[in-house]
Amino acid sequence: MAPLEPYEKVLVDTDFLDEDEDVHGQVSCEQCHGGNPASDDYQTAHEGVVRDPTYPDPSKTCGECHAMDDEGGHPEITGQNSANLHVTLAPFKSKIYLRAQSDPCVRDKIDSAMGTHCLQCHSSCGQCHVSRPNSVEGGFIEGHLFQKTPPVETNCTSCHGSRVGKEFHGENECVPADVHHVEECMGCKECHSGDEMHGIGISGEPFDRYDVANRARCEDCHTMAEPDKAADGSKAKELVHPSHAIHQGKVSCQVCHSMPYKNCYSCHVGKDKSGVPYFETEPATMDFKIGLNTRITEDRPEKYVTVRHIPISPKLFDFYVEDALTNIDKVETWKFATPHNIQLKTPQNETCLACHGNNKLFLTKKDAESWEVKANKDVFVSLKPAPAVRHNWLEQPELHLKKVDCLICHNPALQSPIKDCQQCHAVDSILLTTAAKTPAYSLTNWSFTNKELVEKGDYVVGSNRIPALDIIGILLVLLTFVGCLIHGGLRFISRRRK
Amino acid sequence: MCKKCIKSFVIFLAVFIFIVSYSAPVVSAEESGCVSCHTSTKKLLQITRDIEASKPKVEKPAESKGEG
């Protein structure tokens, strides 16, 4: 996003002064920003001016009205500002501290480096509802008119652009935009409510940003189908595919429905010869990895989740202080992720076997550098034997896996998967879906029983037969015995005569 | 007081309140030095050009590489 021209950044729309357009325009400028409005000289007029009067403490500005419950249903927005994750970026710091030395001198230098580089991306009331964030050089969103919902392009993705923004809008090569964006024209606010945006951590000391209360949940719209319940006309979309019943609570939604997403590596920060701060990262890769959920909670019980490599590096702060992150193996570098490029059909959910047995989708030691193996030990997936090996109790397991739909045996309606051969290889095979069953045995019946299976190209031993051939076979066997008896009898008679 | 006087007074009061309430923000806006500058593209262009010219040139971090 290109920055605004300097004059555009501070140009106030006259509509802002119209009470009907924006009630905030009725508050005098100096009441929030300070300065000297009586002066004609811009330099003296701006003495003491506060560019963003809402950061770090908005209690004297926004808090004058928005500290208590309001009609919009956002209780104490500014009251919880000091714990708002968008403002404090607390999890960011707590994760770095977990990896850092405990030496206070080192921590001071880390704080200084983070203050220069990492913590510039914080937000504030003003940097969401009035102007673009400072990290993208600021400037009014719409002539100082307050925006109840911050615009996606100027605000949300100006910070969440490299990964989430590009994923959601389909800006990564060969990866389509998120289906919610394309099909339903959804933006950020449709899932991420104001309560979540103003949210604080669930726990006292939030461990990561997913700790936020009122987080977006797929289940808020997508509910499991209830066969006996008629559609109630709500926006909820029922999940009818039987895979949902099988994987619910075990696998996160993104594992089946996310496309490859961006992974970043090896960030390190410093200052150039002129003292200008800079950062460098290795080229990002587009990848898709399933790892183990290291923080299983009641709210997020899934064992398998999508994980993204974060740009942490042991040398991250070396410019400021060497060997600062001596405990880098204490926190995973492949981190729980919720990619924003959801599709109904993805390469890994095309068939069951596109995921089960497809080892390259799962995060293993091979995917980690030597220094991060220990950090990710709880994220690595122990690969299971190939499906053909796990099904080797079957005759011809490969053929079964190729020809039989997994959901026939692994039917979610059953308490356990089918392991009885007779259920398929029988006259009344469970593979049959139509009422057309076995025709009566008859010499004139030259067609297959359970024709449905044969027509699908599947000959199932024990289920498919041609009755006329059966009778001919039986007759042939009987005739053979009869022939032997006649032959034996005649030999016996001829011997007696001799 | 006669009815005519009361009627005239009420009309006068209504017109007065209408004019005062309608024009209040405009007056206050026009009186504010902040507003007169920050709503004028012409003034802001001139001032921001002066400010930009007087400010030391801030180098962009040429060494930054990759995505943040």
Image (cartoon, rainbow, N blue to C red):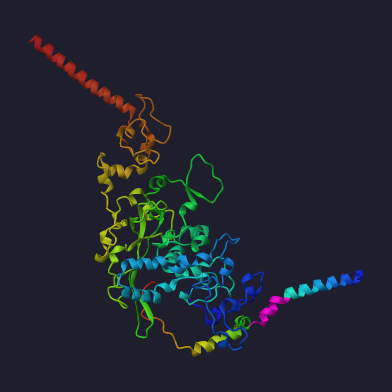
Q: Residue B16 versus residue A6: which sits nearer the camera?
A: B16
Residue at left offset 55%, top offset 61% = A75
Residue at left offset 88%, top offset 70% = B6
Relative to A103, is A339 above or below?
A: above
Q: Residue furthest right?
A: B2
Count of marks overlaid on the render: 0
Quadrant the C terminus of chain A occupies:
top left
Q: Residue A233 versus residue A106: which sits nearer the camera?
A: A106
Q: Does residue A34 appear in this view?
A: yes
Q: Position of residue A276 (x, y in %)?
A: 38, 82
Q: Is residue A118 magenta?
A: no
Residue at left offset 21%, top offset 22% = A480
In the drawing, does residue A487 fall left or right of residue A452? left
In the drawing, does residue A133 fall left or right of residue A315? right
Q: Position of residue A256 (x, y in %)?
A: 39, 53
Q: Residue furthest left?
A: A498
Query: Within the image, what quadrant is residue A97 found in?
Result: bottom left
In the drawing, does residue A347 fall left or right of residue B55? left
Query: Within the image, what quadrant is residue B40 found in?
Result: bottom right
Q: What secondary structure is the magenta-colored segment mainly?
A: helix
Q: Does residue A172 appear in this view?
A: no
Q: Is residue B27 magenta?
A: yes
Q: Position of residue A351 (x, y in %)?
A: 36, 49
Residue at left offset 38%, top offset 48% = A247
Q: Residue A344 versus residue A94: which sits nearer the camera?
A: A94
Q: Position of residue A186 (x, y in %)?
A: 51, 60
Q: Which residues are magenta?
A: B23-32
Q: Residue B46 versus residue A360: which sits nearer the camera?
A: B46
